[in-house]
Image (cartoon, coloured by chain):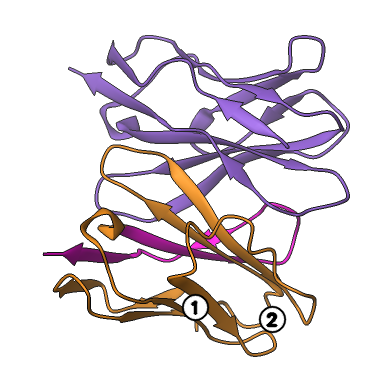
Chain colours: A purple, B orange
Amino acid sequence: AQSVTQLDSQVPVFEEAPVELRCNYSSSVSVYLFWYVQYPNQGLQLLLKYLSGSTLVKGINGFEAEFNKSQTSFHLRKPSVHISDTAEYFCAVRTQGGSEKLVFGKGTKLTVNP
Amino acid sequence: GAGVSQSPSNKVTEKGKDVELRCDPISGHTALYWYRQRLGQGLEFLIYFQGNSAPDKSGLPSDRFSAERTGESVSTLTIQRTQQEDSAVYLCGSGGAPGELFFGEGSRLTVL
């Protein structure tokens, strides 16, 4: 079965600093990978996805993530964060074929300070 | 509707009572997922429906939990004989493309 590990439960950064949120997955088969964001008191929304092709994927709000098959990672990055990026970020994985169960990590709370 | 709608948004119940949570997916979305999010925790998969196929119930934590969905429409999640550890936000997501889910704002359940 697939699983997701988000190594940092909380990441505090200053405004305009770069940020990387780490995600590692485990699966015996090929996967699709996703990052979702949950702003305070709101539902989850899709930030970006990797299905196939280029390993560098770009999402909304200036975020990007890179799929690294050898390291089974899908880290999320932004070169310069804003206060409004304060939210909880969830990495998710789904296997290609077979069960369509989407498995989420425990989340990383990003706090951007002025 | 325009988005995924969940009701009730908040439910407070007494231990031992049954509760029913409802999810209205986006029209045309064949996939529907239920997750549980306990305070400070990630999303715990409960159940997945895809069209008329048999649902994937592998995440349901006990036989007190059940869910139904008629075709590609509304789904209900039922928790019987609620316990305090059932207190959580129950999230419903629907989608058409692999893994691309649109979530409702959740139903917050508090069991006293």
Residue shown at 80%/40% (left/top)?
A: A51
Image spot of residue A108 (x, y percent): 40, 26
Numbered badge on residue B2: 1
Helix, strand or loop at mark 2 = loop
Q: Which residue is mark 2?
A: B28
Q: Which residues are magenta?
A: B89-112
Q: Chain of mark 2?
A: B
Q: Is B17 displayed left or right of B41 in the figure?
A: left
Image spot of residue A3 (x, y percent): 64, 32
Queried whether the magenta region covers residue B103, the answer comes back as yes
Three-letter amino acid code at disc 2? Gly
Q: Check if mark 2 and mark 1 are on a common chain.
A: yes
Q: Is A69 displayed left or right of A17 in the figure?
A: right
Q: CA distance from mark 2 to mark 1?
A: 11 Å
Ranked by sequence position, the earlier of labels 2 and 1 is 1
Give the number of the mark in front: 2 or 1: 2
| Mark 2 Cα shell of 10 Å, populated few (<14), some (14-19), many (≥20) | few
Where on the picture, by quarter, is residue B58? bottom right
Q: Chain of mark 1?
A: B
